[in-house]
Amino acid sequence: MLRRTTVAAAALLAAGALLLSACSGGSAPDASPTAVTPDPDAVVNVRLVSEPSNLDIRETAGAALDQILIDNVYQGLVSRTPDQKIEPELASDYRVSPDGLTYTFTLRDGVTFHDGSPLTVDDVVWSLEQVKSTASYSDSDRLARVQSIVANGKDVVLTLSQPDSSLLWNLTGRAGLVLKKDDTTDRKTKANGTGPYKLTSWKQGDSITFDRNDAYWGDKAKVKEVVFSYIPDNQAALNGALAHELDVVTGFDANLKDQVEANGDFTLVLGKSTDKGTLAMNSTKAPLSDKRVRQAIRQAIDHDAIVKALGAGQTLYGPIPELDPGYADLSSTAPFDPAAAKKLLADAGVKDLTLTLTIPSFYGTTVSQILVSNFNDVGITLKVKAVEFPTWLNDVYINKNYDLSFVLHTEARDFENWANPNYYFTYNNPEVQKLYQQSLSATDEQTSADLLTQAAKIVADDQAADWLYNGASIVAVGTNVSGFPSVNVNERINLADLAKSKG
């Protein structure tokens, strides 16, 4: 997504608060503390927070699609492991030329789509060309440096106009998904992929069901069926778990740990994530156009109190989380100091400031209540405007009509948003844009990461936004379940190793 769609994605998933082998097609770390003897006929019920508006992963915003469809239903030439490494998937191997301009992928044998059609190099070339040439497709811009895509026997060869250090990573996401050429499947309601699960049912407003793909090219799924139930309310999810209606609860509230673990049937598992609780500031309008005011806002915020109230996660003072390349501790750019915040506002000539925080209504009130209190302590009146998500998309994301806004950006490696002056963040710094482009053109990972570190420091020094916290992946897992991912669950849930015992 140019991460013009990422925001929607990120916001959709955070209301409550991811080593692949080339032959298996992917696996995930075990979030359950107890090994189980798999029941091949098991049904696993998983609670998710927010439902996608439709299933078209090519054109529809929302991490709710990436979270369940990528790896499980749709696949690409390469995939990413939970610890963010890139490995072959539909490609049996790949090669990158020393100059970084040619990528050669050898297509795996024996792969079929869920409708029984064999996967061919023509499907791969068509899929990538469609993404590159269709602006309305999510992530179409991610192939911008790809000059040509051609088949050569069993190989698919991508030739670039200039090096792109993010290309392989991009191919593990929407930009790299391989679909059947000229498929007539209605992608808004159905799916025809190559993954270990088939999408068999979508009961809108309720659930999505996957069945095991017994014709899968790699290791077969260990459970017969996975049902994703959409339950926004944490208490309702807790009740469902305690009533044995759910086997896994994602997006959980860490403060409910004792309750969910009380009868010994569940364990609360915390994992790292790239979730970034982002307080956007509209710097195109006064007084937020004044850096001193933005800095005052940041220094008024007690980040430790937010993390404590959420019960999980860690503080974050810049746009790059610890799991991503380019991370650095940027806490020095905005230390908690209400007295300094008051002085900055006075220096800016700002008195009796009232600001409106626009927030999707499914986030609850924990974060906003702390912000109201913190702002009040420095003389800022904060009005909280909770809106339905479509309204947030229209007003904030599309029209940039807001003072402050809060959503949780879940996607990994999304620094590009800060290098895009058209993004809803409203941040425009040519030096940051230059450094980001240089990071893309770097031909070694360390150089690319170092350039991102420099750019992120500028963004934080500019007080472009505040990063309230780096969220944790919070999952309550049944003790009879193993193989459920524990890292970056809001972004991806790879079910390849999911298993459930009998009884």
Image (cartoon, rainbow, N blue to C red):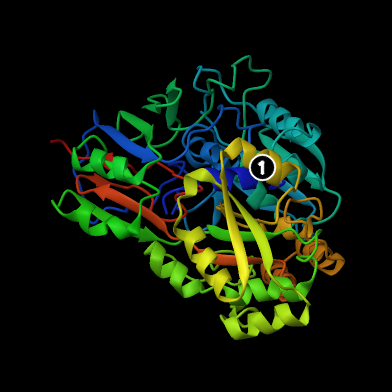
Amino acid found under the numbered disc labelled 1: Thr
Q: How many marks?
A: 1
Asked whether the viewer can see residue 329, the reply is yes
Residue 4 visible at all: no
* Residue 139 point in image, percent of width and height: 70, 41
- Above or below, 156 relative to 396: above
Which residue is at 63% across, 69% downward?
Answer: 380
Between 263 and 433, the one lying in front of the other is 263
**Quarter of the image with the N terminus in it:** top right
The residue identified by callout 1 is 5
Q: Is residue 246 left or right of residue 176?
A: left
Mark 1 surroundings: few (<14), some (14-19) or many (≥20) residues within 10 A: some
For image coordinates 59% across by 16% down, the residue present is: 185
Q: Image height check: is 330 above or below 173?
A: below
**Residue placed most toward the observer, 168 or 384:** 384
Query: In the picture provided, is 450 more to the left or to the right than 66?
Result: right
Q: Left or right: 406 with respect to 152?
A: left
- The correct choice, above or below, for 203 with respect to 432 in the image is above
**In the figure, residue 198 lies in which quadrant?**
top left
In front of the other: 329 or 123 = 329
Quarter the C terminus occupies: top left
* Residue 136 at x, y percent in the picture: 75, 32
Q: Secondary structure at mark 1?
A: loop
